[in-house]
Image (tube, rainbow, N blue to C red):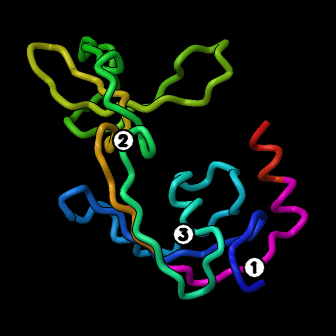
Amino acid sequence: MSEITSNSVVTLRYTIADSKGNMIDGGKEPFQYLHGGYGAIFLPVEAALTGKAIGGSVRVKLQPEEAFGEYDPELVDMVPVEALPQPLTVGMQLEGRVSEDSGAGPAYATVTDIADGKAVLDANHPLAGMALIFSCTVQDLRAATAEELAGAQSRLG
């Protein structure tokens, strides 16, 4: 396989920075994904990588809606401290369910403040509302196995 096409398994060396160039993720470990709209990588990055070969590089600026979404103030809530696991600290991530019958997986919230017996829980992704710069180089490339394709298709529903 000489270039990235649908159903390619792609291994990338990458970095993610904010719009001012401040490093957010230095990509210490390579990132591997199945190319072809399976939702494992940001769509604009996937589109830019189509047709690239090993050694090919791309740099894509992602707007918030193309990355982790816009910041949603509706996802911020104040909860009595005694209703939460102890000891409770700012920065702690808590896991819960959106609703038992929704079929959705677990939801996560970050404790952003504690004051006057209440904790502020923010369920936005930590990078929500941020424009990002995703830079990567193709490190490896191969055709997906039948098992990899079946697994990806089952995750899509």
Image x and y of residue 79, in percent: 28, 13
Image x and y of residue 131, in percent: 30, 48
Which amino acid type corresponds to the residue marked 2 in the rendered image? Pro
* Residue 36, picture quadrant: bottom right
- Mark 2 vs mark 3: which is more N-terminal? 3
**In the image, residue 3 above or below residue 39:** below
Which amino acid type corresponds to the residue marked 3 in the rendered image? Phe
Please, what secondary structure does the residue beneath circle 2 have? helix
Between label 2 and label 3, give the one nearer the viewer: 2
Image x and y of residue 13, in percent: 48, 77
Image x and y of residue 58, in percent: 46, 72
- Mark 1 vs mark 3: which is more N-terminal? 3
Between label 1 and label 3, give the one nearer the viewer: 1
Magenta span covers which residues?
137-150
In this view, the residue in front, 110 or 143, is: 143
In the rendered structure, are the residues bearing label 1 and label 2 in contact, judged by CB atoms less than 8 Å apart?
no
**In the image, residue 5 above or below residue 137:** above
Q: Which mark is residue 64?
A: 2
CA gap, disc 1 to disc 2? Answer: 31 Å
In this view, the residue in front, 74 or 8, is: 8
* Residue 28, picture quadrant: bottom left
Decide if residue 119 is on the left or right side of residue 26. left
Q: Is residue 14 magenta?
A: no
Residue at the spot 61% in from the left edge and 78% down from the top edge: 52
Residue of label 1: 142
Residue of label 3: 31
Please tell me how crowded label 1 is: few (under 14), some (14-19), or many (20+) other residues with Cα within 10 Å: some
Q: Quadrant of the C terminus?
A: top right
Outermost residue toward the left?
A: 116
In the rendered structure, are the residues bearing label 1 and label 3 in contact, judged by CB atoms less than 8 Å apart?
no
In the rendered structure, are the residues bearing label 2 and label 3 in contact, judged by CB atoms less than 8 Å apart?
no
Residue at the spot 90% in from the left edge and 64% down from the top edge: 146
